[in-house]
Image (spheres, helix red, strand yellow):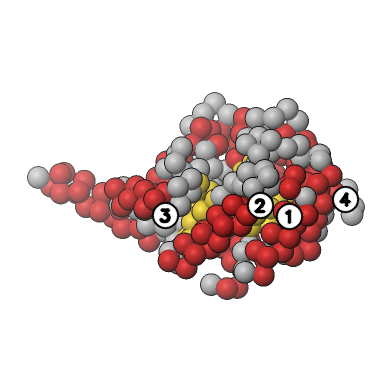
Amino acid sequence: MKSIGFLLFQILIYQFSFAQQQVFDNHVHLWNGDQSIQTYLAQLDSTGQTVTRFSGILIARQGEPLKTRAKNDELIALSKQYPQLLPICSVHPLDGDAATEEIRRLSGLGVKVIKLHPHTQKFEVTDDKVINLCKVAGQLGLVILMDNANIKPGDSENLFDLAIKCADTKFIFAHMGAFNFRFWNIIKVARTAKGFYKDNIYFDISATIVLLADSPVEDEFIWTIRNAGVHTVLLGSDFPQYSLRQAVDALDRLDLKQEEKDKIRYENAQRLLLGDSE
């Protein structure tokens, strides 16, 4: 009985400590608005989890500026209903002036992050319209969240070049290159070139962390995180494909120091996206 009681005690301690952790889920897809939020929160409840903040993501379609505006407004309204929700709105960069006008409007409404997805939205990162939009975003103080799962050839290389060209814009590259994560060790080299790199690249490691924790290349992944800078790495679930439980458990299994895990789990996102507002 003592052994069973001790085991139950340890489980309760684990659940309590998990609940006390501040967690910022930087990658939650809201394909169905409020319904998606309800499903996400129910999933958290089912595993006894809490989340301090979560970023809800939209992805705009080309040629539908009025619908994009309406969907962005819907997401902003949901963020008033759910205080934990940070709205990540979207535009389609190939919509040109309409996209630029929309991010200006969103900035005025207090939005902090814009989502772009080269593969889903079917655009090239090297397109001048993309570069111009990202430069305007930087002028407005908006962060660009860009997919970096290396679905498209040259994905990481093109994104690195984009960040260099848009040096005054902060980027979060989602998934940190996935299985091409090794490329991002280039950042350690870039920092040695005077005046070349402005440290404007951040990463969320949603999905990728679940795949690489306990994998044969886990040590290389950790090495890359440290070379890029632990202070630049954010946690995400990539809901609904993966759960926050999977992401947090994977982070716990990585051979990182506790203070490094705390930064990735919450502190880095809080500093980048919320600053002194909380």
Question: As rendered, which of 186 and 117 lies closer to the eye?
Answer: 117
Residue identified by numbered label 4? 196
Q: Amino acid at mark 1?
A: Ala
Residue identified by numbered label 3? 34
Would you say residue 190 is visible in this rendering? Answer: no
Question: As rendered, which of 191 and 70 lies closer to the eye?
Answer: 70
Please rate how many residues cluster around mark 3, counting C-alpha atoms within 10 Å: few if below 14, some from 14 to 19, many from 20.
Answer: some
Element type at marker 4? loop
Residue identified by numbered label 1? 98
Foreground: disc 1 or disc 3? 1
At which x and y percent is residue 104?
Answer: 72, 64
Give the quadrant of the N terminus. top left
Q: CA distance from mark 4 to mark 3?
A: 43 Å
Q: Quadrant of residue 102?
A: bottom right
Foreground: disc 4 or disc 3? 3
Labels 2 & 3 near each other (Cβ < 8 A):
no
Labels 4 & 2 near each other (Cβ < 8 A):
no
Residue identified by numbered label 2? 65
Q: Which callout, 4 or 1, points at the residue further toward the start of the chain? A: 1
